[in-house]
Amino acid sequence: MNIRSRKNLIPDRQGMTLVELMVGVTLFAVILGAVMMFLVQSRRSYDDTRDRVQYQQGLRAVISMMTREIRTAGCDPEQVGFDEIAVAASGALQCRADLNGDSDTNDNSPDETVSYTYNPGAQELSRNDGVNNMVILRDLTNVQFRYFDTNGNELLNVPLNAVDRDLVRSVEVMIAGETESGEAVDLTSRVAMRNI
């Protein structure tokens, strides 16, 4: 076989035209842009969900702690007699319990006299355990305590006086806040007091 016949066997390899190359690059850019937009949106959605879950976990942990302490309010093994609820306001609650059985709620043993106070200016919820005052939640839009008697009727004249505080049988705690992305999150729990 000579050189001319071999040349005829090899197809013509001229390549792509500039127009074909531009069309290919444009299609690739459109597809890449769509994929990138999808990935960015997915990441934002993931971050928002993660922030919301972390914020809710913080709220749940605080509500769980408050529930435990409100339920133990009034624990008086020596039957000395004291105010189970010493402060009952819309943004503040103080509950007492004699957990170590030493006939008082004023010693240095933490958690016998516990106060929760919401500061709307700083948007913080503080907990004072009789020894330390500590901010336990930040970036809150509202914290509200509501008080109910034996029949489930709300006691409305807050802050409650001593007579009305003696009627309290359950406390409703509502905590509301915002995640970093601006999504509103709130939790509400009604706690029955066991020791009254």
Image (cartoon, grey):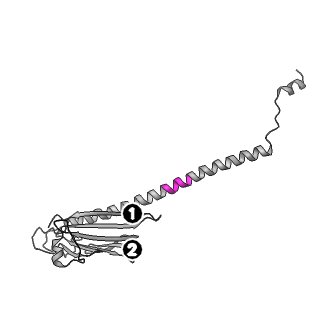
Three-letter residue code for mark 2: Gln
Q: Residue 109's x, y, as percent? A: 21, 71
Three-letter residue code for mark 1: Val
Give me the disc on residue 185: 1
Disc 1 and disc 2 in contact, CB within 8 angstroms: no
Q: Is residue 184 visible?
A: yes
Q: With respect to residue 40, does 20 lie above or below?
A: above
- Left or right: where does residue 33 sit relative to residue 92? right
Residue range (magenta): 39-45
Mark 1 vs mark 2, CA separation in Å? 14 Å
Give yes or no for residue 40 being in the magenta stretch: yes
- Dot 2: within a 10 Å radius of its alpha carbon, few (fewer than 14), some, or many (20 or more) residues? some
The residue mark sitting in front, 1 or 2, is: 1
Identify the residue at horizontal 58%, vertical 53% (top origin): 37
Give yes or no for residue 13 being in the magenta stretch: no
Q: Is residue 138 visible?
A: no
- What quarter of the picture does the N terminus occupy? top right
Identify the residue at horizontal 54%, vertical 54% (top origin): 41
Most distant residue in the top direction: 1
Overall secondary structure of the magenta section? helix
Q: Which is more toward the observer, 61 or 183? A: 183
Give me the disc on residue 123: 2
Question: Is disc 2 placed on a helix, strand or loop?
Answer: loop
